[in-house]
Image: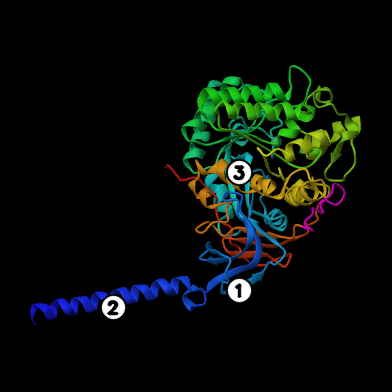
Amino acid sequence: MSRSRVRGWWKWLGAMVLLVAGAGVLAGSDASKESDTYELVIANGRVMDPESGLDAVRNVGIRDGKIAAISSRVLEGRQTIEARGLVAAPGFIDLHQHGQDPRNYQFKARDGVTTSLELEVGTDDVDRWYAEREGKTLINFGVSIGHIPVRMRVMHDPGTFLPSGDAAHRAATPEELAQIQEQVGKGLRRGALAVGMGINYTAAASHAEIVDVFRLAAEANAPVHVHLRHAGMQEPTTGLVGIEEVIAAAAATGAPLHVVHITSMGLGDTPRLIAMVEGARKQGLDVTTECYPYTAGSTSLESAIFDPGWQARQGITYKDIQWVKTGERLTAETFEKYRKEGGSVVVFSIPEDAVRTAVANPIVMIASDGMPITGAKVHPRGQGTFSRVLGHYVREEKALDLMTALRKMTLMPAQRLEKRAPMFKDEGRIRVGADADITVFDPAHVIDKATYDEPLQYSEGIQFVLVNGVPVVKDGQLVEGVFPGRAARAPLSQ
Ligand SMILES: [Zn+2]
């Protein structure tokens, strides 16, 4: 072969390569080709993404559990969800959900939640907690290492969910303090998403014990999700004093801080507590907060919150407390009886103004604080929080706009956790490459149906929910027998 002929052959080969590559590019841009058939397409929905600000009718193509395309052109799917007239938003991330059983997950999914996290109380055994749920859940799940359950185990507290004995009422010995540190540190190494604290429930824990736990969290870049030491407006045990303690601990140690349910902490002083969070953020601290959209709280009657003096501290009396097992309001006699027995109560203590202020504030995330279902009159918040914000506060009350509300349920919780657990960078967004956790709802009809009298009611108007690309709610109904939920967990360091 002559040199020129060799050169000619190479030219020809080069041209063919270009042609083939060009055809590939064409195929890649042509959605009608077989190679671009998606596993599932959400067609014609109003796609709302709080990160990019996108708010327009689009088609979303899903493949391998991820968002693979967002396009104004028609996309071919082996399955298509027709979403005309509906909003397609990132799936809601609930930072605060105590009930973590299959029945809870069904209620969460019907309320638009795709990731359910127990970050306030948490667990004392991170490995066991995840292993119990792996491969068995409708939605994604995650947990914190909990100072409360760790303290209960170390101090042999007889309580079940919250302390009622030594873990609530006694200072820890130096040996116990060392064990608490060891167990919290171990939980962080095993991938806990955060450190949970409920200082009001471990009332005898010293300020030094609390700061030392913050220090561990700071080393692991883990946010501390904390129920404050004090709540309400009676000096010297106000919610303001409570928030001062943890902002100081965060500032001094560098731990990120997340104050849970700011409304039940602040009560009438809620705007002042939110101003503390805003002020700390302006000074450069990593401080965030959350609320649920209800005027009642819920907790255990045997907990330290109801130690003597609770009426003055919380500004309530017996009749403001409802026993979850029966729905009856308490008296002095039944208070004593049920406190010995132990169990959940619903507590009507939060002013509506405080709720509205927090729900409408753009820096306050939405989180349910949903309770385990231990009785017929459990608090409705675990079942209805997200639809209540969208239906009642956005549509009916116009307390905030829809995009702001979605941001508080999706992007902000993801950002809260993504420094600790990078997997959250692909959560809370409608973006190519993000996890296909998507909630499709009817903005004209979405509403909570769970009430204090009838709390075990599904929300309405949540039409389709995808978890890792798998529908768990279809046409407003639960899909049976699917378990696409995954562990939301920080990287293991040991
Ligand atoms: Zn709490």
Q: Quick check: which quadrant has ligand 1?
A: top right
Q: Is residue 373 left or right of residue 471?
A: right
Element type at mark 2: helix
Q: Nearer the viewer, residue 229 or 293?
A: 293
Q: Which residue is mark 2?
A: 16
Between discs 1 and 2, the one toward the N terminus: 2
The picture quadrant where one finds residue 281 is top right
Q: Mark on residue 79?
A: 1
The amino acid sitting under disc 2 is Met
Region of the chain picked out in magenta, as a range? 444-455
Report the predominant secondary structure element of the magenta stretch: loop
Q: Residue furthest bottom?
A: 1
Q: Which residue is mark 3?
A: 412
Q: Mark on residue 280?
A: none
Residue 300, visible in the rendered structure: no
The picture quadrant where one finds residue 290 is top right
Where is residue 485 shown, x and y percent of the image? 59, 58
Q: Nearer the viewer, mark 1 or mark 2?
A: 2
Answer yes or no: do the residues labelled 1 and 2 have beta carbons within 8 Å?
A: no
